[in-house]
């Protein structure tokens, strides 16, 4: 798999995912799409990600389901075992908490527990993210949970191109993939529309901006904030390299470590709460592998340790942003 | 419908008062959202006013209510303070949850509104726990769990009702069946001919009632509450209703049957009950008009109070996570 | 019970053959566990032989089965190879899962035994997915989901049956009601008078049958499978039975009603059906004795094969986690 | 709260927990115990942890439940809201995957979302651990998931005394606590029976063995393996300090950091898979706080990245043990 994109007109991330689903369904009639409200009579998904699919590919392959996430993921596991390529939607990541058994005990483990007799090539789409005043049960990031579970792959695009390329890769992957969509990015992230051969390999990050003084690793919407911070820092003469992880499990150790080795300073940013988040794993690996070679301690930036708060000033303060990232970078620059 | 549970004239007017409050409050809320003075997802309950108004008429302040994102009608009918509700919806420090919960997670301890959940189905298992404490304490309280028709297909529904039935808990499971779960119709998702039928699987009474008919709703609620208080266990009430403004306010309604929606709105239960009360001579128009004016004034005051209340300080992120904020490492906020 | 689905003589003998295999296999397994030659939790199915034996008589190798920790009877009845089963139970490389799954997680693709789960309730949602693929492919296959009476109280049961009903999936939900979930009785945990009653809530057929009566069990299974293959959707079968050796082998049975257990064991369905077949002249004793001897020999051979098979190499930890083992960082094994 | 224990006769960890539950129920009639099979007619719990309680305190307060973990934890959340002190059992940690919504979206968040109006003082007991040939769905450690969720406390005792003291502290705590029991330790760990005033403060670790060359941090059954490794190392002249974390959320940063500062070498051991486990957080914090002060990179030891395998040699190799810990320590000693 190579990372290629042919650019044409600009699309949103929502449109890119929609296109990825449509192209995959057109190319492989084993691809199925289902979840709450996903078919056209129900609007093609709450934010329209699956719009047009049921009309084009039929009610057999594109189905709105009852509100029953265990049944949804169970149907995904079973249809994957039966040779299909299900793409199931859990509307918001917080709702995956009612389906964790199916994801963790079954989808993730069946290949191993059956000694490789079976595989579970499913993709689960989940939206999430704070910033839209939806309170404490609609915006959590649990990528750290999924990454901790052997057998799952986890991806978190920040651009339409990557969303397209990763979705196609997830669907073609022989193993279960968690595809995380930031609810703000779906409309906000715009970019060229990739052609149907575009794939982004799972496990490969990308340098979004080159720099030499420090490395900022981010994923999902935090890439936007990291780039904002990099811009502010540039004005101050600090050159930040920004890496978009794109995949969390597996994550691109080589890219992160070589960048951090180059700059000597590493920061990791995520919207999940900082404590026990994925930044901890990356910091632990980097501190280990680059022991004695870094100019400053690895710095982590994450959400505050609380539920997503409702009130706007609290919600804003809860989420990491360009300023907090830039502040962290400034402090790091005082080292070494 | 048994005559044993017919509300007297005073109770009927009281039910209407709650309905009028709910209707006016929803109208005001939509107005403030439309003008952009408030911003957040809003799940209008307009059209579903009868259900909690009738139920609340048979509850005391000590009885418990657990409800959902579409639940402000349940709270207001139960008596929650308009001021602390509005301040919470506006995310202010005087909100019932200091602005931390918002419209989807309101709580009003004084009125027994214990949990408002944004997770489909989750009001039910928690209501069981509250009902259990009532039973243990022998204080005669009951717990009402509100949820939608869509929620009747999720696992928590099944687990909760079964447990309540085997433990004979004083819970009333109130399914507000508005025919849609988000954009999907009842028929597409629900194998039961009626949700009330599912009660058979738990050997408890299950009734489908016209949730827009205050007398029918009252009778069903009164019977269920009486059973619960008498130690006879839970009841499943399926209250048929309709939501006038879609799933979340601002939805387009392309997924809806237009005729069905038109008919439902034409049969708006609030003016209908109002007319009935007057026609039957239970109350006169002037009394109701005065009542409605008082409600508007009360809402005016609450909105004003809410918008004058300060926004919370960011230091609040550190509080109420644990009882003792010092357990959280300082750099957890870096 | 309708006459339409009476098994002919050959089928009755075939059902008995499966029952005899299951009984002998359980006896052998308990023996090896007792002597310490095998070590792991073992969930004996002894007493429940009729259910899968009768069901399997109406299935083909292509039909799917999902089952649970107490499920070796379901697999063997479906035709799973004794050798690969025993080698797996012994944790050897020739086991169906290379020793990685063990007795609680067996799979036999050739015979359609797709998933064995250790999580109560989880066989059902997965069976739906398999049934959906059969429907999509139009290949006429059905999926059987086995589970216990205790599992009928968990959320997955409800979600799965509702989905199967609204999507008219070719699934047969087989509740093997042995009256206990671990150490707790049906009555203490299950509000339904009978689990079959719950079918009403999904508008599907629900039948309670004597799961220890091969003819009654066969008829119910045949009818359900015929419905499923005809596109008429799922059926819930509650098959009444009893487990002779408690929840996990080695349990003390202090939690059980001794009289009930004695009576169930006295009514052991395997010798009962054997005697009936002979009494009715369907087959003679000598034929059955020869069949049973052949079964013992087959088990001898499988056990020998299993114990001669090597234990897996520790490098196997890195394989079958993902299709491509190279995605796992080397130091993940430090 | 102070950490005190009066020693009398030796008890197992199972007995100590049983005693803690009994003492708590005797002292406070708001304490409730429920879960599958926990009452005496059902044997007082699958391994007897709640034996005698229903007989002594009655069927009202001690109840065997249906197999319905969402309903169990829901009843715990509701009864806690109603002023009681529920101790709910989820038989094995893997089964918590069907109840994660109740734990994460509700128990953990209600205090915050209600602005402190309510609290959810519940305790959830969960057994887990590999080593008894129970395969891939019965032995996972998810302490990293729970620790990542703001609002939960997580404890994992390794001795009967701590099990007693932590259980009493959890029950008395105003917030939801996850109490993790290792299935092997329940019978294997023996120690003095603490008296009824004994409490172990949540968030405080303990030095199990003093040392000066390196610090090994472990919890639950891995403490036993760490002590085994320390013994082997001692024979080779390497002095290892062994810290038993006891609490994961919050964890005892002060103790871990001061020990690591002293020895200059830090290793973290857990039975959960290494990737994205709690060792990552501890390593990240220690590498940050002790930047430039450590003699060797922080080393992590965890289970292999796969489901718990059934076959004995695989299961044995899957779990960290004294030898793997000692090997890691030897490698660390070559640094600095
Ligand atoms: C477990 C879960 N799944 C999905 C959702 C998203 N969701 C929010 S409301 C809703 C529809 C619920 O329908 P119903 O129960 O009928 O209640 P109504 O909104 O009609 O009052 C859905 C699917 C959720 N909140 N929780
Ligand atoms: C979700 C979940 N909760 C609890 C358990 C522990 N457990 C294993 S078997 C069992 C009893 C199941 O009873 P039943 O469904 O009647 O099946 P049986 O064992 O009687 O065949 C329980 C509680 C589990 N495996 N999964
Ligand atoms: Mg609805
Ligand atoms: Mg059973």
Image (spheres, coloured by chain):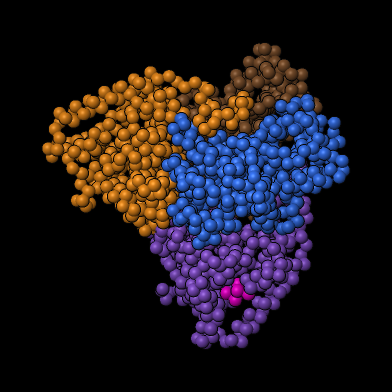
Chain colours: A brown, B orange, C purple, D blue
User: B63 above or below A81?
Assistant: above
User: B274 above or below C151?
Assistant: above
Q: Residue A10: x, y in percent?
A: 56, 26
User: A312 above or below A33?
Assistant: above
D271 drawn magenta: no
Q: Nearer the viewer, residue C299 or D50?
A: D50
> In the image, A54: left or right of D241?
left
Q: Is residue A91 visible?
A: no
Q: Quadrant of residue B58?
A: top left
- The residue positioned 59% from the left and 86% from the top of the image is C285
Q: Nearer the viewer, residue C172 or B233?
A: B233
Q: Residue A49: x, y in percent?
A: 50, 36
Q: Residue C194: x, y in percent?
A: 41, 64
Q: Quadrant of the N terminus of chain A?
A: top right
- The residue positioned 56% from the left and 42% from the top of the image is D170
Q: Quadrant of residue D227?
A: top right
Q: Is residue C183 visible?
A: yes
Q: Quadrant of residue C88?
A: bottom right
C23 drawn magenta: yes
Q: Magenta part mainly helix, strand or loop?
A: helix
Segment colored magenta: C19-25
């Amino acid at each position: 798999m190579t990372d290629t994109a042919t650019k044409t007109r600009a699309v949103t991330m929502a449109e890119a995912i929609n296109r990825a689903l449509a192209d995959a369904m057109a190319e492989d009639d084993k691809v199925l799409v289902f979840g709450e409200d996903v078919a056209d009579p129900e609007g093609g998904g709450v934010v329209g990600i699956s719009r047009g699919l049921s009309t084009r590919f039929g009610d057999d392959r594109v189905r709105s389901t009852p509100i029953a996430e265990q049944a949804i993921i169970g149907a995904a596991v079973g249809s994957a075992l039966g040779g299909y390529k299900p793409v199931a939607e859990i509307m918001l990541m917080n709702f995956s908490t009612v389906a964790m058994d199916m994801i963790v005990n079954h989808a993730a483990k069946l290949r191993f527990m059956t000694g490789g007799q079976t595989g579970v090539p499913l993709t689960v789409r989940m939206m999430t993210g704070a910033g839209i005043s939806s309170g404490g049960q609609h915006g959590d990031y649990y990528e750290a949970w999924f990454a901790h579970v052997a057998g799952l792959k986890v991806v978190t695009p920040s651009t339409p191109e990557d969303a397209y390329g990763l979705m196609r890769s997830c669907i073609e992957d022989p193993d279960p993939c968690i595809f995380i969509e930031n609810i703000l990015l779906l409309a906000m992230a715009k970019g060229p529309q990739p052609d149907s051969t575009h794939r982004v390999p799972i496990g490969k990050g990308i340098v979004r901006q080159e720099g030499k003084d420090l490395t900022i690793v981010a994923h999902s919407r935090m890439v936007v904030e990291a780039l904002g911070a990099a811009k502010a820092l540039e004005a101050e003469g600090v050159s930040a390299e920004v890496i978009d992880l794109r995949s969390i499990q597996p994550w691109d150790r080589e890219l992160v470590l070589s960048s951090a080795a180059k700059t000597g300073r590493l920061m990791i940013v995520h919207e999940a709460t900082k404590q026990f988040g994925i930044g901890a794993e990356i910091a632990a690996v980097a501190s280990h592998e680059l022991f004695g070679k870094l100019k400053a301690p690895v710095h982590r930036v994450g959400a505050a340790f609380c539920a997503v708060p409702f009130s706007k000033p609290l919600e804003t303060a809860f989420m990491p942003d360009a300023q907090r990232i830039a502040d962290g970078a400034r402090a790091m620059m005082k080292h070494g | 419908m048994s005559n044993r549970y017919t509300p007297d004239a005073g109770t009927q007017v009281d039910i209407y008062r709650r309905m009028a409050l709910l209707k006016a409050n929803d109208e005001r809320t939509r107005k403030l959202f439309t003008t952009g003075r408030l911003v957040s997802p809003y799940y209008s309950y307009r059209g579903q006013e009868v259900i909690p108004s009738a139920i609340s008429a048979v509850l005391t302040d000590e009885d418990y209510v657990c409800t959902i994102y579409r639940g402000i009608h349940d709270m207001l009918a139960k008596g929650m303070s308009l001021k602390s509700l509005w301040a919470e919806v506006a995310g202010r420090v005087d909100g019932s949850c200091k602005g931390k919960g918002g419209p989807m997670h309101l709580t009003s301890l004084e009125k027994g509104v214990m949990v408002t959940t944004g997770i489909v189905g989750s009001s039910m298992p928690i209501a069981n726990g509250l009902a259990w404490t009532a039973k243990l304490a022998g204080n005669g309280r009951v717990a009402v769990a509100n949820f939608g028709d869509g929620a009747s297909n999720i696992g928590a529904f099944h687990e909760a009702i079964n447990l309540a039935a085997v433990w004979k808990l004083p819970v009333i499971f109130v399914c507000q069946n508005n025919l849609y779960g988000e954009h999907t119709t009842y028929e597409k998702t629900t194998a039961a001919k009626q949700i009330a039928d599912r009660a058979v699987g738990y050997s408890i009474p299950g009734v489908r009632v016209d949730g827009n008919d205050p007398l029918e709703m009252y009778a069903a609620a009164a019977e269920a509450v009486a059973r619960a208080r008498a130690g006879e266990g839970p009841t499943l009430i399926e209250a048929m209703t309709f939501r006038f403004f879609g799933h979340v306010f601002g939805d387009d309604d392309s997924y809806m049957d237009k005729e069905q929606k038109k008919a439902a709105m034409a049969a708006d239960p609030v003016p209908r009950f109002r007319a009935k009360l007057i026609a039957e001579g239970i109350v006169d128009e002037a009394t109701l008009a005065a009542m409605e004016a008082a409600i508007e004034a009360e809402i005016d005051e609450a909105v004003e109070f809410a918008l004058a209340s300060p926004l919370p300080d960011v230091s609040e992120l550190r509080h109420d996570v644990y009882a003792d904020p010092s357990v959280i490492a300082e750099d957890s906020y870096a």
